[in-house]
Amino acid sequence: MAALSIRIDENLRKGAEQAFASMGLSLADGVRSYLNYVNVERKIPFSPVSDPMYAHNNSGHIPNEETEAAIKNIDEGKNLHEVSWDEFRALLHSPIADDE
């Protein structure tokens, strides 16, 4: 048997605990059920894009066509080029301390 330790928001923990309790499950039982589902089905039981927590920009909005095309290119390894750290910082237009 293995132990799993995760950090989550206290309100999320309490809400999930209450939801699982309403189904007759402990929080640990619910997490085990979720992990078992993922293990057996090889997928998660919801669509990440419809959940704002997992949307590309974390706002709940589905990316536009240009952003989707860029994501697809990255996934396929197309139109990529290497840049130095200095070039990357210049692209961001944000000062970053060299000692970080």
Image (cartoon, rainbow, N blue to C red):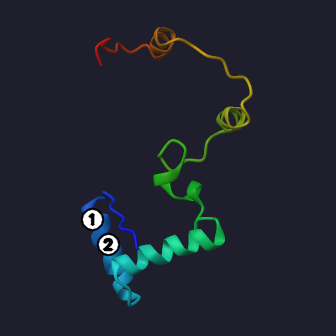
- Residue at image position (47%, 46%) is 59
Q: Are marks 2 and 1 in contact (CB under 8 Å)?
A: yes
Q: Position of residue 97 (x, y in %)?
A: 30, 13
Residue 36 placement: quadrant: bottom right
Query: With respect to residue 86, does 75 lie above or below?
Result: below
Q: Which residue is mark 2?
A: 15
What SS does tag 2 mark? helix
The amino acid type of the residue labelled 1 equals: Asn
Q: Is residue 59 above or below residue 67?
A: below
**Farthest residue, direction bottom:** 24
Is residue 58 left or right of 20 when viewed as pictured? right
Image quadrant where residue 43 sits:
bottom right
Q: Residues within 10 Å of mark 2 (few under 14, many from 20)?
A: few
Taking the view exactly as shown, the residue that stands out farthest to the left is: 10
Q: Quadrant of the C terminus?
A: top left
Residue 10 lies left or right of residue 27; in this view the side is left
Residue 58 position, x and y percent, is 47, 46
Left or right, 4 with reference to 61: left
Query: Residue 66, which numbered label?
Result: none
Is 16 situated above or below 47? below
Rendered residue at 66%/36% (across/down): 71
Residue 11 numbered mark, or none: 1
Tell me where residue 53 appears, x and y as whole percent: 46, 53
Going by the image, does 60 lie left or right of 71?
A: left
Question: Where does residue 50 sit, x and y in percent of width and height?
Answer: 57, 58
Of 72 and 33, the residue lying toward us: 33
Q: Residue at x 60, y 61 (%)?
A: 47
Q: Amino acid at mark 2?
A: Gly
The residue positioned 50% from the left and 73% from the top of the image is 34
Find numbered disc 1 in the image and state the secondary structure of the residue it sits on. helix
